[in-house]
Image: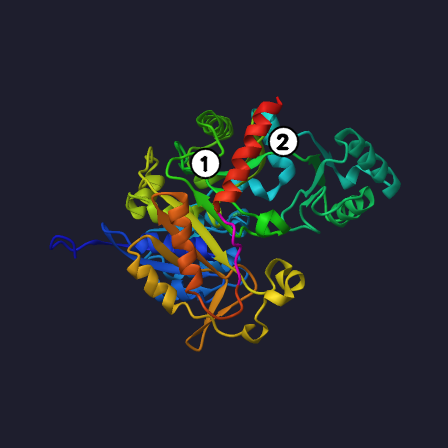
């Protein structure tokens, strides 16, 4: 009840993978304009989502038929749906749910799920903004009869790239995934082995490895307008100082303004210009297809023109967790505007945010690298989030705790295999936000969870600033 008036009831279907969607659900249930009921199709029994949901269903593989059935069974209560993870978007969840139930969905149509094919993605950019592509070559199994011929072409291309190469399978999660010279292999033989493990599943791109600093660009889109969100910086590698294997992202930061400390305003403006150009030229077929966050672009800043590492048609995890807690607008109103095609701006608090993920002992091979740092007696034990929740309450909006790959079992919370729980800190500076995030992280006990210690640290940011200065002077 607000001002003695009964608030309008709104039902929202949330297709959920982890902490990103817990942050969305939190933003919905913080609504002051609506009485929101969430219907969650979830990957696991996420304790946060279970507590908030009107109805909750577990669909471990997030298959679109099961999601659609859940939507159909509750369609009289649901006003719209929103999707976080890429797999159901690629598999056409919006197309199916809208067709069968009439519930409008906030995510792109299947044909705009750009991450479905890295080859098509590069070719699209080549047509519209060729300058964002690194030098690349597509290797298609159909064009080769023998492995010897493949090896010859691969090695010839490596000659041209002076070995500075990135191997990318066309389809997500095919074979061994993305491999980078210097990180995943240091000899051509190793690179070729990685390449062949992917090549047997389909086309593979080998592209030039670009030196630079990364930023994550995201934008809300109603199909007609693009509303850029502030840039964020993701921490992909598992261990401190950007060592260890790539992960889903160990944490991220956002500065007070829309740019990042190592970027100039002109570099930010260039990002906006590039994404707008792609949006305008790609969006000719219909004006609702690119709905949601169809542009979550990983840019790399080189000191000259930025390049695009990849684009996804979904919000970033953790990157959207840097944005939602400081959204000044009612998230339900933002969603209605997206559906109506009249989202032209959004307002955010003037604050920095830092997300730190706590992850299980095996994540990123941590136990193998640092066995002495793991409290073995805690492995597989329940995780206690109660203290962190209590602290977050005390911090009054400056700290939020969002479980991800966690499961409620017999009233206890267990970490599963992937990133376990995200804590976002909000502050007047990046450092203040970082301290708030770390306070929450410290309060989470049990399960032998660990986290990167250098997310948004002064030293890490200084290193990025110095690197960019060097790069700008190089050209
Ligand atoms: N932060 C990486 C991702 O969302 O894919």
**Residue 371 sits in quarter:** bottom right
Q: Which mark is residue 296?
A: none
Identity of the residue furthest to the left in this view: 4
Question: In 3D space, how far apart are the residues under numbered discs 2 and 1 (Cα atoms)?
Answer: 29 Å
Residue under the image location 61 percent in, 64 percent down: 362
Q: Nearer the viewer, residue 410 or 421?
A: 421
Whether residue 313 is visible, yes or no, is no
Q: Is residue 226 above or below residue 368?
A: above
The boundaries of the magenta stretch are 450-455
Q: In the visual, does 202 lie left or right of 41?
A: right
Identity of the residue furthest to the top in this view: 475
- Residue 248: % across, % down: 56, 52
Q: Residues within 10 Å of mark 1 (few under 14, many from 20)?
A: many
**Residue 223 sits in quarter:** top left
What sort of colour scheme is used for the picture? rainbow
Q: Nearer the viewer, residue 450 or 311?
A: 450
Q: Is residue 321 above or below residue 303?
A: below
Q: Which residue is mark 1?
A: 260
Q: Nearer the viewer, residue 233 or 8?
A: 233
Would you say residue 108 sits in the magenta stretch?
no
């Amino acid at each position: 009840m607000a001002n003695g008036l009964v608030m309008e009831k709104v039902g929202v279907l949330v297709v959920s993978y982890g902490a990103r969607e817990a942050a969305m659900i939190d933003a919905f249930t913080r609504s002051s304009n609506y009485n929101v009921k969430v219907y969650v199709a979830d990957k696991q029994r996420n304790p946060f989502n279970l507590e908030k949901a009107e109805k909750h269903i577990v669909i471990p593989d997030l298959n679109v038929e099961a999601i659609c059935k859940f939507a159909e069974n509750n369609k009289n209560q649901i006003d719209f749906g929103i999707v976080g993870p890429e797999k159901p978007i690629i598999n056409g969840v919006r197309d199916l749910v809208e067709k069968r139930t009439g519930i409008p969905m906030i995510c792109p149509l299947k044909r705009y799920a750009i991450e479905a094919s890295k080859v098509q993605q590069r070719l699209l950019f080549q047509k519209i903004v060729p300058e964002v592509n690194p030098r690349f070559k597509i290797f298609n199994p159909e064009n080769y009869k023998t492995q010897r011929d493949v090896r010859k072409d691969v090695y010839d291309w490596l000659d041209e790239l002076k070995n500075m190469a990135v191997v990318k399978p066309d389809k997500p999660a095919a074979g061994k995934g993305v491999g980078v010279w210097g990180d995943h292999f240091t000899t051509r033989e190793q690179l070729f082995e990685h390449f062949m493990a992917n090549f047997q599943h389909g086309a593979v791109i080998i592209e030039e490895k670009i030196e630079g600093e990364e930023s994550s660009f995201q934008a809300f889109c109603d199909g007609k307008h693009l509303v850029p969100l502030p840039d964020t910086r993701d921490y992909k590698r598992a261990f401190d100082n950007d060592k260890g294997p790539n992960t889903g992202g160990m944490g991220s930061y956002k500065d007070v303004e829309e740019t990042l400390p190592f970027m100039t305003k002109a570099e930010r403006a260039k990002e906006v210009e590039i994404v707008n150009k792609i949006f305008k030229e790609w969006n000719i077929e219909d004006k609702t297809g690119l709905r949601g966050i169809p542009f979550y672009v990983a840019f790399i800043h080189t000191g000259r023109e930025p390049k695009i590492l990849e684009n996804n048609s979904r919000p970033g995890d953790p990157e959207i967790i840097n944005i939602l807690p400081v959204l000044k607008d009612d998230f339900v109103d933002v969603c209605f505007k997206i559906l109506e095609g009249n989202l032209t701006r959004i307002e955010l608090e003037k604050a920095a945010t830092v997300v730190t993920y706590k992850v299980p002992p095996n994540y990123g091979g941590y136990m193998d690298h640092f066995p002495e740092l793991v409290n073995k007696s805690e492995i597989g034990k329940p995780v206690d989030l109660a203290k962190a929740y209590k602290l977050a309450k005390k911090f009054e909006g400056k700290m939020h705790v969002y479980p991800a790959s966690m499961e409620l079992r017999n009233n206890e919370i267990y970490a599963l295999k992937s990133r376990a729980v995200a804590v976002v800190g909000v502050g007047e500076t990046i450092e203040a936000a970082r301290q708030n995030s770390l306070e929450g992280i410290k309060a989470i006990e049990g399960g032998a969870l660990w986290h990167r210690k250098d997310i948004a640290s002064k030293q890490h940011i200084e290193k990025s600033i110095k690197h960019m200065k060097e790069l700008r002077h190089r050209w």
